[in-house]
Every structure is written in C-alpha cells, then in structure tokens.
Image (tube, rainbow, N blue to C red):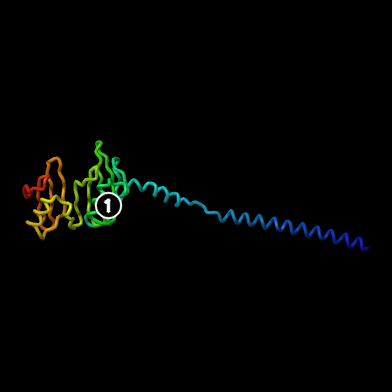
Amino acid sequence: MRKIILSTAAILSLVLSSCESKKTENTEVLTNKSEVVEQPVVSESDIANNLESSASTNSYMVLLDNGQEKKVALDPNETIISANNLPVNAQNFVSKNFGNMEFVNAIKEVDRNITTYNIQLKDGTKIEFTDNGDWTEVKNGLGKAIPIKFFPDGIQKYLQSKYPKIDAKSIEMDSKDKEIKVELLQNKVDLKFDLNGNFIKID
C-alpha cells in the first residue's frame, strides 16, 4: 500500500512539473510577442519628412524689403555655404563692420568661371564679394543705414562735409565704369566717385 502511495505521489509530481514548464514557455512566448509589438515603426510621414529635409538644400531663405522672409529656389550655378566657408577677407569685413550680426543666407555663385559670394544679414544688409573676399556692393533694403567706415577715405570726408546728417543706404564698386556709386538714405541722392574716392557728380 505504501508503494502505491509513493508511486502516485511521484506521478503527480511529474505532472505538476510538466505544467510549470509549459506555463514558463507560454510566458516567454507572450513576453517575446510583447517585445516585438513595442519595437518602433517608421511611418510614411517620417519618410516624407526625411525627404523634405534632404531636399531643403535646393532652396534658401531671403529677407524681403518688407521685412518678410521667403524661401527661394537655388539657381543651378548657386551653392549654399556656411559663413565659415566665405573667403577670409569677407569674414573679416563682416566681423569688423557688422559685428556678430546673424546671417540669413550665404550663397556662392559661379557664372562663366567667375566666382562671387552673396550674403544677407538679419538687419537686411546685402553684401556681394569677389572670389578674393573684396566687397563690390553693400546695401540695405529695409530702409536702414549702412556703416561708412569701410568707404574710401575721400568718400568718407566728402559725406561728412557735404551731408553730415545724412546716412548712406548703399555703395557699389562699378569696375566696368570705374566708378563708385553711393546712394544716400534720407534724401535719396545718388553720388558718383572715381575709384580713388574723388567726387564726380550727383547722378
């Protein structure tokens, strides 16, 4: 009788052990399924956003004369660059005359093997540089004055003498006509000087 009881107990022990094993396996399966479900999924919107981000280099922001920002398309001969990729002379010019003014854009343009750089600052100032980083045009389209401390000495003296209370709106180095053109802000007078800064006429 005792042997029968022991045998029955052994069988029950094996059955319980088998049930516990299956329960553990089922728990592991459920856990694995849960882990699979919780893995992040890349949505169609994420893909679209990535494509839009990669295409953003085909356009850039400009500051219009009314102060509004607008995105414009790059021309085939234009490349968006960082301020650090400007010629050293251009970087020094901006730092010396406009301090740490934030850039809106910086564009490198190559046309018929001639390289120029165009930048726009947050205050509306637009500057064009040669491939060596020398300025050729500085202007502000938001009705603000530009500094004149980089103007040739002769032009600075003329403006301080003839127009002491008038600010400059733009200056352009016209190498073709061998002239420097200055537009005044408040009275909208256009002045012409030779490349040495000698006054020629009011245009």
Which residue is painted at 69% across and 56% down in the image? Answer: 26
Residues packed near mark 1 inside 10 Å, few (<14), some (14 to 19) or many (20 plus): many
Instruction: Count how many numbered circles sit on residues in the image.
Output: 1
The image shows residue 115 at horizontal and vertical percentages of: 25, 40
Relative placement, left or right, of 168 versus 78 is left
Of residue 85 and residue 36, the one placed in the foreground of this image is 85
Which residue is painted at 14% across and 40% down in the image? Answer: 176
The image shows residue 73 at horizontal and vertical percentages of: 30, 46
Which residue is painted at 10% across and 57% down in the image? Answer: 160
Considering only vertical position in the picture, is 131 above or below 97?
A: above
Image-quadrant location for residue 159? bottom left
**Amino acid type for the residue under numbered disc 1:** Val
Q: Residue furthest top?
A: 112
Element under disc 1:
strand
The image shows residue 29 at horizontal and vertical percentages of: 66, 54
Relative placement, left or right, of 81 versus 168 is right
Image-quadrant location for residue 114? top left
Relative placement, left or right, of 159 versus 47 is left
Image quadrant in which the N terminus is located:
bottom right
Of residue 98 and residue 139, the one placed in the foreground of this image is 98
Of residue 86 and residue 28, the one placed in the foreground of this image is 86
The image shows residue 103 at horizontal and vertical percentages of: 28, 53
Considering only vertical position in the picture, is 168 above or below 136?
A: below
Q: Kindly identify which residue carries mark 1.
A: 62
